[in-house]
Each structure stands twice: as structure tokens, then as C-alpha cells.
Amino acid sequence: MGSTDMDRARLIFEWLKLSETGQLWLLPYHLDNHWMLIIIDLPRESCFFLDPIANPSPEDIKNVISMAFDYYNDWQKKRGRDSGIQWRAVKCNGKKSYMIEEINEMQNEWVDALYDLL
């Protein structure tokens, strides 16, 4: 992605400018050999954070996305939420974390499903 937080924020901002009404942005995030997913809901200035091992959302990506929202709001000539971006951790199937065996099983199911589509 970019080499600095500002570069990353600018890149995300460029994507956000392409948003259509009601569109959500899926942002995969990799940290220390671990993948997470951030879902950006631009109109509501909300982000949903999915992590299969229930880590809290990392401050570095929260800061980058906050900068991207600031760029976007400036571009739109609108004021952002006074409280800032609303972050929510998402539970999947009522669970907040998964065992590594469950993650591996799901990965295998996804690979099989993708293979069947090809």
C-alpha cells in the first residue's frame, strides 16, 4: 500500500471518492502474519472490525482511516462527526473469536468453494 501513514490515508481517500450511495468498502489488513478485515461505512462514518482471534483494532490503521475520513470530508466540504469514526468489533455466528482449527477448517472450505467455481 503506501510507505507512510499519510500515503496510506491518501490511497484510501482516493478509493472513498469513488463510493456510490450505500456502498461498503472491505479493507483487508495484515499485521504480524495475521489477517483482519475492516469494513468501512462511509455515510455513517463507521468502521466494523473483524478479527478471528478477537484482537482489538490496531491503533495504526485506525489513525490511517481517520486521516482518510478527514481528507474525504474536506473534499466534500463537510464536517465529520464530532465523536469521530465509530468503531465496532463484529462477532461472527455469535462468537468473537475462533480456535485455529476452526479457522483452518473455514479456509479449506473457502478454497474448495473457489476451486468449484473455477
Image: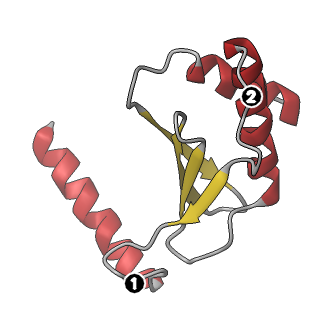
Q: Is mark 1 in CB contact (under 8 Å) with mark 2?
A: no
Q: Indicate the position of residue 64 as horizontal and vertical percent values.
A: 78, 40
Three-letter residue code for mark 1: Glu
Compared across the picture, whether 96 is left or right of 113 comes to right
Mark 1 vs mark 2: in front: 2
| Image position, residue 106 (x, y; %) | 31, 69
User: Which quadrant of the figure contains the N terminus?
Assistant: top right
Residue 81, picture quadrant: top right
The first of marks 1 and 2 along the sequence is 2
Give the mark count. 2
Tell me if 108 is positioned left or right of 72 in this view: left
The residue where tag 1 is placed is: 101
Residue 4 position, x and y percent, is 88, 32
Asked if residue 7 lies left or right of residue 109, the reply is: right
Q: Nearer the viewer, residue 27 or 34?
A: 27
Tag 1's secondary structure? Answer: helix
Q: Nearer the viewer, residue 36 or 71?
A: 71
Which residue is at 74% across, 47% downward?
Answer: 84
Give the residue at x 44% y 82%. Answer: 98
Please report the residue visible at 38 percent of the width from the left and 31 percent of the height from the top: 22
Q: Is residue 87 visible?
A: yes
Q: Is residue 67 above or below residue 16?
A: below
Q: Could you tell me if residue 1 is visible in this image?
A: no
According to the picture, the residue beneath numbered tag 2 turns out to be 79
Q: CA distance from mark 1 to mark 2?
A: 45 Å
